[in-house]
Image (cartoon, rainbow, N blue to C red):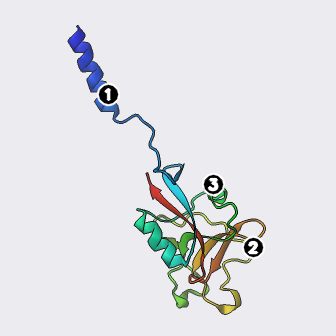
């Protein structure tokens, strides 16, 4: 009887898989199914994306109001922060701009500040920063400007 019980326990253990909750590495914060990391170092949008890739991720994509509030808490004290949205920098898309995330996920949520995106004063602004204005919404911005950033990756 004891052998059968041990055998059944082993089968149950292997069929359940690893029951431990998945965690993020040190320096990363878990939200939903991803890990996020705030980077204080000021970088251009492209430099920030390359840095996130070197850490195994991308600039953060945002898919819900709750996720956006979480990213806001990560970036407290750093008003303007790059996230992974861009319109590909194609000048022909001045009116109907198509935004995408660097991680390839669907651009199914946005939190633009009032009047944004706007290519302010006719200058191409193909990259997205968060924490813009009083309500900490999104703004389209020139990618060469240097800001803090938020990276994300699967855990």
Residue nearest the observer in this picture, 43 or 117:
43
- The residue shown at (72%, 66%) is 136
Q: Residue furthest top?
A: 1
Q: Secondary structure at mark 2?
A: loop
Indicate the position of residue 145 as horizontal and vertical percent values. Answer: 60, 82
Whichever of labels 1 and 2 marks the residue nearer the N terminus, that label is 1
Q: How many marks?
A: 3
Within 10 Å of disc 1 (Cα), the crowding (few <14, some 14-19, many 20+) is few
Residue 16 quadrant = top left
Q: Secondary structure at mark 3?
A: helix
Q: Quadrant of the N terminus?
A: top left
| Mark 1 vs mark 2: in front | 1
- On the question of residue 44 being in view, the answer is yes
Report the side of 147 relative to 55 (left or right): right
Q: Is the residue 109 above or below the residue 124 in the image? A: above
Residue 154 quadrant = bottom left
Q: Are marks 3 and 1 in contact (CB under 8 Å)?
A: no
* Residue bearing mark 1: 13
Within 10 Å of disc 3 (Cα), the crowding (few <14, some 14-19, many 20+) is some
Whichever of labels 3 and 2 marks the residue nearer the N terminus, that label is 3
| Mark 3 vs mark 2: in front | 3
Report the side of 61 relative to 103 (left or right): right
Badge number at residue 58: none
How many angstroms separate mark 3 from mark 1 (CA)? Answer: 35 Å
Within 10 Å of disc 2 (Cα), the crowding (few <14, some 14-19, many 20+) is few
* Residue bearing mark 3: 70
* Residue bearing mark 2: 114
């Amino acid at each position: 009887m004891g052998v059968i019980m041990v055998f059944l326990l082993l089968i149950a253990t292997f069929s359940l898989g690893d029951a431990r909750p998945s965690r993020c590495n040190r320096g990363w914060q878990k939200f939903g199914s991803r890990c996020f990391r705030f980077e204080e170092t000021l970088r251009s949008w492209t430099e920030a994306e390359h840095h996130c890739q070197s850490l195994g991720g991308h600039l953060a994509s945002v898919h819900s109001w709750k996720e956006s509030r979480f990213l806001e808490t990560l970036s407290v004290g750093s008003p303007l922060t790059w996230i992974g949205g861009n319109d590909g920098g194609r000048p022909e898309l001045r009116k109907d701009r198509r935004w995408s995330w660097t991680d390839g996920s669907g651009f199914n949520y946005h939190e633009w500040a009032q009047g944004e995106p706007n290519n302010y004063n006719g200058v191409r602004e193909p990259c997205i920063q968060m924490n813009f204005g009083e309500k900490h919404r999104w703004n389209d911005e020139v990618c060469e400007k240097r800001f803090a950033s938020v990276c994300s990756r699967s855990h």
